[in-house]
Image: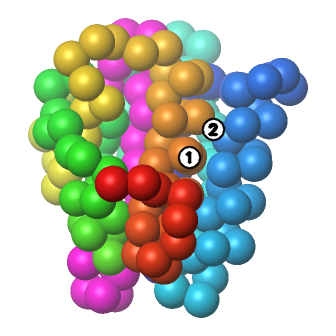
Amino acid sequence: MRVTICAVGRLRSGPERELVDDYLLRFDRTGRSLGLGPATVTEVEAKTGGMGAEAALLSRAVPQGAVLCCLDERGETMASPAFASLLGRWRDEGRDAAFVIGGADGIDPELRGRAQKLLSFGAMVWPHMLVRVMLAEQLYRAATILAGGPYHRA
């Protein structure tokens, strides 16, 4: 199961980039034997055109046939074991997953409406660069849960 993070904006070098890279490397290493990964990040940047232009670029970044999951404040909140179970189910169905993270204004309603899953990291709004870190960590946590590892303490 390949995982693609499709995100608006370029993540420059710094602590956020280091965390995303570290957690995705951990996800790839832990998930490989479970049929999870690799995980890649595709960054898009629309200089003009707002959410509509961003949505067009994000749509092109989603791999054909992948489950479309948008990170959105209106989405479902999930406990980490439930998220791990969801990833495991998509893997078992032979599906790849694309997680879409919008820009500062969010995700265009048309793109959000096409998503098979809307996922929220809580009622608070998070900066889209931090959402990348949080998603990468949850992917790694999900892999460790599915592997029966000690990282997640329930």
Q: Can you say which quadrant of the picture contains the C terminus?
A: bottom left
Q: Which residues are magenta?
A: 89-108
At 83% from the left and 22% from the top, the residue drawn is 14
Among the 4 quarters of the image, the one containing residue 119: top left
Q: Is residue 14 above or below residue 49?
A: below
State the count of labels.
2
- Which residue of the protein is positioned furthest toward the right in this rendering? 13
Dot 2 corresponds to which residue?
43
Classify mark 1: residues with Cα within 10 Å, few (<14), some (14-19) or many (20+): many
Dot 1 corresponds to which residue?
136
Sooner in the amino-acid sequence: mark 2 or mark 1: 2
Q: Is residue 146 above or below residue 57?
A: below
At 86% from the left and 26% from the top, the residue drawn is 13
Q: Nearer the viewer, residue 98 or 44?
A: 98
Residue 91 among those drawn in magenta:
yes
Q: In x, y percent, where is residue 151?
A: 54, 58
Q: Secondary structure at mark 2?
A: strand
